[in-house]
Amino acid sequence: MKKIFPIILMALSIALVSCGPGEKDKGETVANVNGSPIALKEFQKEVSIAAKRDPNLKLTPEALEHQLHTVIDKKLMIQEALKKGLSQDEKFLDTIKEFWEQTLIRELVNSKSKEWSERLFVTEEEVQARYKRIGTRLTLRLLDAEDKEKAEEAKVALAKGSFDRAEAVGPLLIEDVRLADPLYAAFDLSEGETAVFPGRDDFLVVRVIKKEQMPVPPLATVYADIKESLLEQKKEKALEDWLEELKASAEIEITKENLKKVK
């Protein structure tokens, strides 16, 4: 087999270069290990991954032979693991399930992200508004309230300087706050001002204790970064809103009695 490797690998190198991604797979194989074939298409992917990991990799016959033997070694080890019954091991199955779930979720998020990228955009006004907030540093006192009435009561207490239950936060920069966060709007408040912002499930009461201004770079130097950051945050918000819609339309039952048993 070693003697015919150079001929096989030379033909393989031509196939790797000439066979485009849109070309139909004809089922060719490059090797057979104990009756288990290694498809040309499968090996092409392995070589492609290796080339991406090492940009200096040259696809010489020797390099291809080395890569093929790596695939063969992997195939042999998988066969031995199957013989030992390791594929039925509970730990292995749990690992496979977790990997499958993570991969599936990642592909779904990537698919939705691509969909949102085609319809989401950042306006000039949004970039300008974000730029005005850059360089602002806030020191805050925060209180959570479960409804509007309690939020207004907390607002009055904070305005009078009653900070017993209030959380101290800061110094805080706009870069520390997401677009969908109620605190984002706090950067428009003046020092000493108190306001109530609605959250997803509750209300946030905010009092600005200190507001400082720091030097900021020219807009031209940070314009692209601001625009990219806002677009990514819009995608994150779109994902959160989409998940909330899924939850609202789903039938979800929580057994609180059993939940209490979790330690």
Image (cartoon, rainbow, N blue to C red):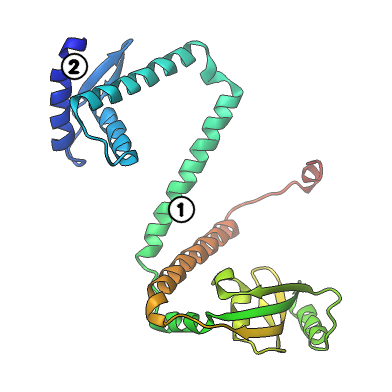
- CA distance for labels 2 and 1: 43 Å
**Amino acid residing under circle 1:** Val
**Mark number, residue 226:** none
Is 18 left or right of 141, judged from the image as shown?
left
Q: Quadrant of residue 223?
A: bottom left
Which one is in front in this view, the residue at disc 2 or the one at disc 1? 2
Count of numbered marks: 2
Q: Residue at x 21, y 11 (%)?
A: 2
Quadrant of the frame with the N terminus:
top left
* Residue hosting label 1: 109
Work out whether 46 lies above or below 238. above
Q: Element at badge 1?
A: helix
Q: Are marks 2 and 1 in contact (CB under 8 Å)?
A: no
Q: Element at badge 2?
A: helix
Q: Quadrant of residue 57?
A: top left
Q: Residue at x 28, y 23 (%)?
A: 66
Is 163 left or right of 31, judged from the image as shown?
right
Is 37 left or right of 83, judged from the image as shown?
left
Residue closer to the observer: 62 or 186: 62
Q: Residue at x 75, y 46 (%)?
A: 255
Residue closer to the observer: 174 or 103: 174
**Amino acid residing under circle 2:** Phe
Is 50 left or right of 261, judged from the image as shown?
left
Residue closer to the observer: 169 or 28: 169
Q: Position of residue 37 (x, y in %)?
A: 29, 18
Whichever of callouts 2 and 1 sits on the residue coming sooner in the sequence is: 2
Quadrant of the frame with the C terminus:
top right
* Residue hosting label 2: 5
Work out whether 128 lies above or below 53. below
Q: Position of residue 179 (x, y in %)?
A: 54, 72
